[in-house]
Amino acid sequence: MENNLKKQIRNNPWVDVPLADDVKRILKRQTVADTYYKRGDGQATKDLKHVEAQHRKWVNDIIDLSEFPYCYFTNGATDALHYWLLTEDREYQYYQGEYEYPMMIKPGHEINQLIDPDKVLYVSVPSACDGNFVELQDINCPVILDCTYVSSTNIQKINTPKNTEQVMFSFSKGFGLVGQRVGLVYTKEPHKTLHTLKELENWNYGGVRTIDLIMSNYTVDDMWNIHRAKQIKICNEYDFTPSDCYFLSTSIAPYYKRRRRTTSNDAARLCLTSLTKW
């Protein structure tokens, strides 16, 4: 049985997010009719302003968003990536082992360490490469910062590069809201497309209410605190190294080498989601 599970982990290149019964119970408090609003009457804008103010405080111990005055609802970080790349006329770069989806939308330039100051840098923190926080130092190019894994880790500070243009958030990783498609993106300047949509109250009103519901019942590090012991237990059993993200781990064992995401690091990213009930 154990060998079958190890094989399953080795063969899985993706991150499967855990589903938690307590999150499901909380979601049952929301109905579609809660946000059956007339567009333009201001109710949706009131909800979004409330959620924005709440979210800024919710993540503040991890990342300071005070330099990003504009906030928009998106259908997850995936949607934020769409809106960025489909309106981006500059070349962009990304570290080896980074989240693959942006490259599926629009090809970029893979780098190891040397950053091109003339290209936009897409980077995730915590990193999609291994689920760990990374230090972003001496970055002088424009930056698109993907914070999708925030809400699935403990509290660690993210140092935001001075030229960061957008910061993206999702609620799918920490809370399993993959089908609800809820996220936020913050920008320093009005977004090329989302700003007009926001002026027209054109976004998912129910999604905003879902974010409110989650933040009203959980702190940004609650899921990590709740599930960290399970992660440690699994990692001890399989001789993995726990990642900062509670459902990920790494291993340098040759058996898992196909899950290594960079040529410069022997640590393979391994997803723990299928190994326990969360």
Image (cartoon, grey):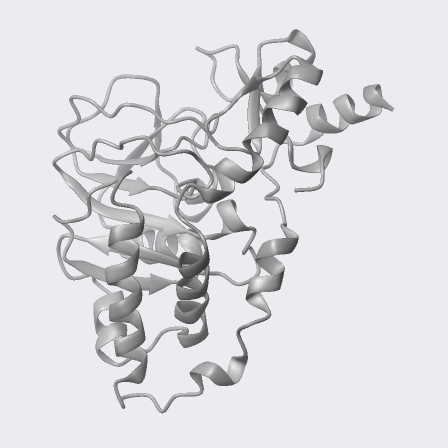
Front position in the image: 66 or 201: 66
Front position in the image: 201 or 230: 230
Residue 157 appears left or right of 6: left
Find residue 229 and report its horizontal and vertical position in percent. 59, 28
Residue in the image at 39% along x and 88% along y: 37
| Image quadrant where residue 118 sits | top left
Residue 256 appears left or right of 53: right
Front position in the image: 183 or 237: 237
Find residue 48 and report its horizontal and vertical position in percent. 29, 70
Residue in the image at 78% along x and 26% along y: 5
Residue in the image at 50% along x and 51% along y: 172
| Image quadrant where residue 35 sits | bottom left
All told, the count of numbered labels is 0
Residue 30 appears left or right of 156: right
Find residue 108 and report its horizontal and vertical position in percent. 35, 36
Question: Considering only vertical position in the picture, is 52 above or below 162?
Answer: below
Question: Which quarter of the rendered picture does the C terminus lie within?
Answer: top right
Question: Considering only vertical position in the picture, is 202 above or below 97?
Answer: below
Find residue 264 and report its horizontal and vertical position in percent. 44, 10
- Tell me if I can see residue 271 in this picture: no
- Tell me if I can see residue 263 in this picture: yes
Question: Which quarter of the rendered picture does the N terminus lie within?
Answer: top right
Residue in the image at 49% along x and 61% along y: 181
